[in-house]
Amino acid sequence: MHPFAQLRPLLAEIGDAKRVRVAGAPGSLAEQSFARTWARLVAGEDVADVAYSETAAAVTRARLAGIDTGVLTTAGLSEGEALDVLRRGFDEVAGPLDAGLRERLRAALGPQSCPAAVPALAGSLNAQPRAGATAPGKPRIVVEPPESHGDHCLTVAVYGVLVAPVVGADPVAPFLLGVAHHLHNVVLPDAGFAGEVLLGNALERVMATLEERELAALPGPLAARVREVLALRPGAEVPEARAFHAADVLDRVLQVHHHARAAAFTSAQALDDLELVHAGPVQAYHLDVLAAAGL
Protein backbone atom coordinates (compact mmCIF):
# COMPACT_ATOMS: atom_id res chain seq x y z
CA MET A 1 0.00 0.00 0.00
CA HIS A 2 1.32 3.45 -0.90
CA PRO A 3 2.22 5.64 2.09
CA PHE A 4 -0.38 8.20 0.98
CA ALA A 5 -3.05 5.50 1.29
CA GLN A 6 -1.71 4.50 4.71
CA LEU A 7 -1.91 8.12 5.86
CA ARG A 8 -5.35 8.81 4.41
CA PRO A 9 -7.48 7.74 7.44
CA LEU A 10 -5.39 9.87 9.80
CA LEU A 11 -5.48 12.83 7.43
CA ALA A 12 -9.27 12.58 7.26
CA GLU A 13 -9.52 12.61 11.06
CA ILE A 14 -7.20 15.59 11.31
CA GLY A 15 -9.30 17.40 8.71
CA ASP A 16 -12.35 17.02 10.92
CA ALA A 17 -10.86 19.71 13.19
CA LYS A 18 -12.38 22.12 10.65
CA ARG A 19 -15.77 21.11 12.00
CA VAL A 20 -15.08 20.82 15.74
CA ARG A 21 -15.60 23.75 18.09
CA VAL A 22 -15.32 24.36 21.82
CA ALA A 23 -16.84 26.85 24.24
CA GLY A 24 -14.80 29.89 25.12
CA ALA A 25 -12.93 30.29 21.84
CA PRO A 26 -14.21 31.43 18.44
CA GLY A 27 -13.93 29.32 15.33
CA SER A 28 -13.14 25.71 14.64
CA LEU A 29 -10.16 23.99 16.23
CA ALA A 30 -8.35 24.30 12.90
CA GLU A 31 -9.09 28.04 12.76
CA GLN A 32 -7.86 28.47 16.32
CA SER A 33 -4.62 26.71 15.40
CA PHE A 34 -4.29 28.81 12.25
CA ALA A 35 -4.63 32.04 14.23
CA ARG A 36 -2.21 30.80 16.89
CA THR A 37 0.30 29.75 14.22
CA TRP A 38 0.37 33.19 12.66
CA ALA A 39 0.54 34.89 16.06
CA ARG A 40 3.54 32.76 16.97
CA LEU A 41 5.26 33.39 13.65
CA VAL A 42 4.74 37.15 13.84
CA ALA A 43 6.01 37.12 17.43
CA GLY A 44 9.28 35.72 16.13
CA GLU A 45 9.10 32.07 17.17
CA ASP A 46 11.23 29.64 15.21
CA VAL A 47 9.30 28.38 12.19
CA ALA A 48 10.35 24.78 12.78
CA ASP A 49 9.21 24.87 16.41
CA VAL A 50 5.83 26.23 15.34
CA ALA A 51 5.50 23.68 12.53
CA TYR A 52 6.28 20.64 14.66
CA SER A 53 4.29 21.68 17.74
CA GLU A 54 1.17 22.71 15.81
CA THR A 55 1.32 19.52 13.74
CA ALA A 56 1.73 17.40 16.87
CA ALA A 57 -1.28 19.13 18.40
CA ALA A 58 -3.28 18.50 15.22
CA VAL A 59 -2.51 14.77 15.33
CA THR A 60 -3.58 14.63 18.97
CA ARG A 61 -6.82 16.51 18.19
CA ALA A 62 -7.86 13.63 15.93
CA ARG A 63 -9.09 11.83 19.04
CA LEU A 64 -8.93 14.36 21.89
CA ALA A 65 -10.61 17.20 19.97
CA GLY A 66 -10.43 20.31 22.16
CA ILE A 67 -8.94 18.62 25.22
CA ASP A 68 -5.49 20.18 25.57
CA THR A 69 -2.98 20.99 28.28
CA GLY A 70 -4.85 24.12 29.33
CA VAL A 71 -8.11 22.24 29.81
CA LEU A 72 -6.46 19.37 31.65
CA THR A 73 -4.46 21.52 34.07
CA THR A 74 -7.56 23.63 34.76
CA ALA A 75 -9.29 20.36 35.64
CA GLY A 76 -6.64 19.61 38.25
CA LEU A 77 -4.09 17.50 36.40
CA SER A 78 -0.41 18.28 36.69
CA GLU A 79 1.44 19.21 33.51
CA GLY A 80 3.03 15.76 33.55
CA GLU A 81 -0.35 14.05 33.82
CA ALA A 82 -1.71 16.26 31.06
CA LEU A 83 1.22 15.36 28.84
CA ASP A 84 0.52 11.67 29.43
CA VAL A 85 -3.03 12.18 28.16
CA LEU A 86 -1.79 14.01 25.07
CA ARG A 87 0.71 11.26 24.36
CA ARG A 88 -1.98 8.58 24.62
CA GLY A 89 -4.12 10.49 22.14
CA PHE A 90 -1.15 10.93 19.83
CA ASP A 91 -0.03 7.30 20.05
CA GLU A 92 -3.51 6.01 19.27
CA VAL A 93 -3.42 7.43 15.73
CA ALA A 94 0.25 8.07 14.90
CA GLY A 95 1.13 4.56 13.72
CA PRO A 96 1.09 5.38 9.97
CA LEU A 97 3.56 8.26 10.36
CA ASP A 98 7.21 8.03 9.37
CA ALA A 99 9.09 6.77 12.44
CA GLY A 100 11.52 9.67 12.63
CA LEU A 101 8.80 12.26 12.17
CA ARG A 102 6.59 10.51 14.71
CA GLU A 103 9.35 10.76 17.31
CA ARG A 104 9.95 14.44 16.52
CA LEU A 105 6.26 15.28 16.79
CA ARG A 106 5.74 13.33 20.00
CA ALA A 107 8.60 15.28 21.57
CA ALA A 108 6.87 18.52 20.56
CA LEU A 109 3.68 17.79 22.51
CA GLY A 110 2.90 19.99 25.48
CA PRO A 111 1.69 23.48 26.38
CA GLN A 112 1.74 25.90 23.47
CA SER A 113 2.58 29.54 23.64
CA CYS A 114 -0.12 31.83 22.33
CA PRO A 115 0.87 35.47 21.86
CA ALA A 116 -1.96 37.88 22.55
CA ALA A 117 -1.72 39.67 19.21
CA VAL A 118 -3.17 37.70 16.30
CA PRO A 119 -2.36 39.34 12.96
CA ALA A 120 -5.33 40.68 11.02
CA LEU A 121 -4.66 38.38 8.08
CA ALA A 122 -5.42 35.33 10.23
CA GLY A 123 -8.77 36.71 11.34
CA SER A 124 -9.68 37.62 7.77
CA LEU A 125 -8.79 34.21 6.36
CA ASN A 126 -10.73 32.52 9.17
CA ALA A 127 -13.74 34.60 8.15
CA GLN A 128 -13.29 34.13 4.39
CA PRO A 129 -15.29 31.12 3.11
CA ARG A 130 -13.91 28.72 0.54
CA ALA A 131 -15.77 28.39 -2.75
CA GLY A 132 -15.80 24.62 -2.82
CA ALA A 133 -15.91 22.71 -6.11
CA THR A 134 -16.44 24.96 -9.13
CA ALA A 135 -15.88 24.59 -12.86
CA PRO A 136 -15.90 27.15 -15.69
CA GLY A 137 -19.30 27.55 -17.32
CA LYS A 138 -21.15 25.56 -14.66
CA PRO A 139 -23.19 26.60 -11.61
CA ARG A 140 -21.47 26.35 -8.25
CA ILE A 141 -22.34 23.40 -6.02
CA VAL A 142 -23.02 24.94 -2.62
CA VAL A 143 -22.43 22.75 0.43
CA GLU A 144 -23.03 23.79 4.02
CA PRO A 145 -21.24 24.69 6.11
CA PRO A 146 -18.38 25.95 3.95
CA GLU A 147 -14.87 25.64 5.29
CA SER A 148 -12.85 28.81 5.78
CA HIS A 149 -9.51 29.62 4.25
CA GLY A 150 -8.02 29.37 7.72
CA ASP A 151 -9.41 25.83 8.01
CA HIS A 152 -7.93 24.87 4.66
CA CYS A 153 -4.56 26.55 5.08
CA LEU A 154 -3.88 25.08 8.52
CA THR A 155 -4.92 21.62 7.36
CA VAL A 156 -2.72 21.80 4.26
CA ALA A 157 0.19 22.95 6.44
CA VAL A 158 -0.24 19.98 8.79
CA TYR A 159 -0.68 17.53 5.92
CA GLY A 160 2.46 18.97 4.35
CA VAL A 161 4.48 18.03 7.42
CA LEU A 162 2.98 14.54 7.58
CA VAL A 163 3.53 13.67 3.91
CA ALA A 164 6.98 15.29 3.71
CA PRO A 165 8.91 12.07 4.46
CA VAL A 166 7.04 10.28 1.67
CA VAL A 167 8.54 12.63 -0.93
CA GLY A 168 11.84 13.26 0.82
CA ALA A 169 11.04 16.84 1.82
CA ASP A 170 12.00 18.98 4.78
CA PRO A 171 8.66 19.34 6.62
CA VAL A 172 9.09 23.00 7.62
CA ALA A 173 8.82 24.63 4.18
CA PRO A 174 5.55 22.85 3.25
CA PHE A 175 4.09 23.90 6.60
CA LEU A 176 4.91 27.57 6.08
CA LEU A 177 3.73 27.47 2.48
CA GLY A 178 0.53 25.81 3.64
CA VAL A 179 -0.40 28.58 6.05
CA ALA A 180 0.62 31.31 3.55
CA HIS A 181 -0.60 30.12 0.17
CA HIS A 182 -3.92 32.00 0.26
CA LEU A 183 -2.74 35.40 1.46
CA HIS A 184 -4.46 36.99 -1.54
CA ASN A 185 -7.80 35.77 -0.20
CA VAL A 186 -7.54 38.10 2.78
CA VAL A 187 -9.12 40.60 0.38
CA LEU A 188 -10.21 38.51 -2.62
CA PRO A 189 -13.45 36.56 -2.08
CA ASP A 190 -13.19 33.00 -3.34
CA ALA A 191 -15.05 32.27 -6.57
CA GLY A 192 -13.11 29.06 -7.14
CA PHE A 193 -11.46 27.90 -10.33
CA ALA A 194 -14.41 29.26 -12.32
CA GLY A 195 -13.72 32.74 -10.98
CA GLU A 196 -10.00 32.44 -11.66
CA VAL A 197 -10.70 31.60 -15.29
CA LEU A 198 -12.95 34.65 -15.64
CA LEU A 199 -10.24 36.90 -14.20
CA GLY A 200 -8.17 35.80 -17.17
CA ASN A 201 -4.88 37.58 -17.69
CA ALA A 202 -5.56 39.75 -14.64
CA LEU A 203 -5.45 36.79 -12.24
CA GLU A 204 -1.70 36.73 -11.73
CA ARG A 205 -1.52 40.50 -11.20
CA VAL A 206 -4.45 40.51 -8.78
CA MET A 207 -2.97 37.69 -6.71
CA ALA A 208 0.50 39.24 -6.66
CA THR A 209 -0.80 42.66 -5.64
CA LEU A 210 -2.93 41.34 -2.81
CA GLU A 211 -0.28 38.90 -1.64
CA GLU A 212 2.33 41.64 -1.48
CA ARG A 213 -0.11 43.78 0.48
CA GLU A 214 -0.13 41.18 3.26
CA LEU A 215 3.60 40.43 3.08
CA ALA A 216 4.39 44.11 3.52
CA ALA A 217 2.62 44.08 6.88
CA LEU A 218 4.73 41.20 8.24
CA PRO A 219 8.03 41.56 10.09
CA GLY A 220 10.86 41.71 7.55
CA PRO A 221 12.56 38.37 8.32
CA LEU A 222 9.25 36.50 8.32
CA ALA A 223 8.13 38.16 5.09
CA ALA A 224 11.40 37.13 3.45
CA ARG A 225 10.96 33.53 4.58
CA VAL A 226 7.37 33.46 3.34
CA ARG A 227 8.44 34.83 -0.05
CA GLU A 228 10.98 32.02 -0.31
CA VAL A 229 8.38 29.31 0.19
CA LEU A 230 5.77 31.02 -2.00
CA ALA A 231 8.28 30.71 -4.84
CA LEU A 232 7.84 26.93 -4.56
CA ARG A 233 4.12 27.12 -5.35
CA PRO A 234 4.08 27.22 -9.19
CA GLY A 235 5.68 23.80 -9.77
CA ALA A 236 6.31 20.39 -8.26
CA GLU A 237 9.94 19.84 -9.19
CA VAL A 238 11.49 19.92 -5.71
CA PRO A 239 10.48 17.74 -2.73
CA GLU A 240 9.11 20.60 -0.63
CA ALA A 241 6.84 21.72 -3.47
CA ARG A 242 5.67 18.14 -3.99
CA ALA A 243 4.85 17.83 -0.28
CA PHE A 244 2.81 21.03 -0.42
CA HIS A 245 0.90 20.11 -3.57
CA ALA A 246 0.21 16.60 -2.27
CA ALA A 247 -1.14 18.12 0.94
CA ASP A 248 -3.25 20.66 -0.94
CA VAL A 249 -4.93 18.19 -3.27
CA LEU A 250 -5.47 15.65 -0.49
CA ASP A 251 -7.23 18.25 1.63
CA ARG A 252 -9.41 19.48 -1.22
CA VAL A 253 -10.56 15.98 -2.13
CA LEU A 254 -10.96 14.78 1.47
CA GLN A 255 -13.17 17.83 2.05
CA VAL A 256 -15.45 16.70 -0.77
CA HIS A 257 -15.47 13.17 0.65
CA HIS A 258 -16.54 14.61 4.01
CA HIS A 259 -19.60 16.26 2.48
CA ALA A 260 -20.49 13.10 0.57
CA ARG A 261 -20.12 11.02 3.73
CA ALA A 262 -22.22 13.46 5.76
CA ALA A 263 -24.97 13.42 3.14
CA ALA A 264 -25.08 9.62 3.29
CA PHE A 265 -25.06 9.39 7.11
CA THR A 266 -27.71 7.09 8.59
CA SER A 267 -29.03 6.57 12.10
CA ALA A 268 -27.84 2.96 11.91
CA GLN A 269 -24.25 4.17 11.73
CA ALA A 270 -24.67 6.07 14.99
CA LEU A 271 -26.69 3.41 16.79
CA ASP A 272 -24.95 0.27 15.55
CA ASP A 273 -21.49 1.11 14.24
CA LEU A 274 -20.69 3.79 16.84
CA GLU A 275 -22.87 2.37 19.65
CA LEU A 276 -24.48 5.71 20.44
CA VAL A 277 -26.29 4.04 23.34
CA HIS A 278 -23.08 2.74 24.81
CA ALA A 279 -22.44 0.28 27.61
CA GLY A 280 -23.06 1.62 31.10
CA PRO A 281 -25.23 1.29 34.20
CA VAL A 282 -28.34 2.69 32.49
CA GLN A 283 -27.89 1.22 29.01
CA ALA A 284 -30.69 -1.31 29.49
CA TYR A 285 -33.10 1.43 30.54
CA HIS A 286 -32.07 3.61 27.60
CA LEU A 287 -32.76 0.74 25.22
CA ASP A 288 -36.17 0.14 26.83
CA VAL A 289 -37.06 3.82 26.37
CA LEU A 290 -36.05 3.75 22.72
CA ALA A 291 -37.97 0.54 22.08
CA ALA A 292 -41.07 2.01 23.70
CA ALA A 293 -40.73 5.12 21.53
CA GLY A 294 -40.35 3.06 18.39
CA LEU A 295 -36.73 4.12 17.88
Image: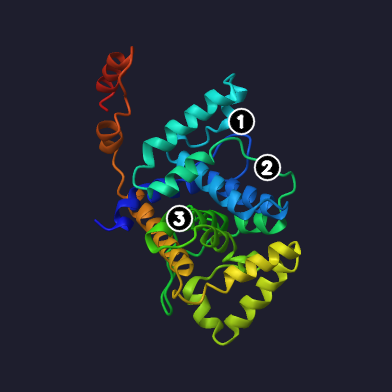
The residue that appears at 59% across and 81% down in the rendered structure is 204
For label 3, the SS is helix
Q: Which residue is mark 2?
A: 114
The residue that appears at 53% across and 38% down in the rendered structure is 109
> Does residue 220 sit above or below 271 in this rendering?
below
C-alpha gap between disc 2 and disc 1: 11 Å
> Does residue 172 sit above or below 265 in this rendering?
below
Q: Are marks 3 and 2 in contact (CB under 8 Å)?
A: no
Q: Amino acid at mark 2?
A: Cys
C-alpha gap between disc 3 and disc 2: 22 Å
Q: Quadrant of the N terminus?
A: bottom left
Query: Quadrant of residue 80 in the image?
Result: top right
For label 1, the SS is helix
Q: Is residue 203 left or right of residue 120?
A: left
Q: Quadrant of the C terminus?
A: top left
Q: Which residue is mark 1?
A: 70
Looking at this view, name the residue that lies furthest to the front.
Answer: 100
Q: Amino acid at mark 3?
A: Tyr
Q: Which residue is mark 3?
A: 159
C-alpha gap between disc 1 and disc 3: 25 Å
Nearer-the-camera pick, 170 or 201: 170
Measured as percent of width and height from the top left, residue 110 is found at 57, 35
Looking at this view, name the residue that lies furthest to the bottom.
Answer: 201
Measured as percent of width and height from the top left, residue 100 is found at 42, 48
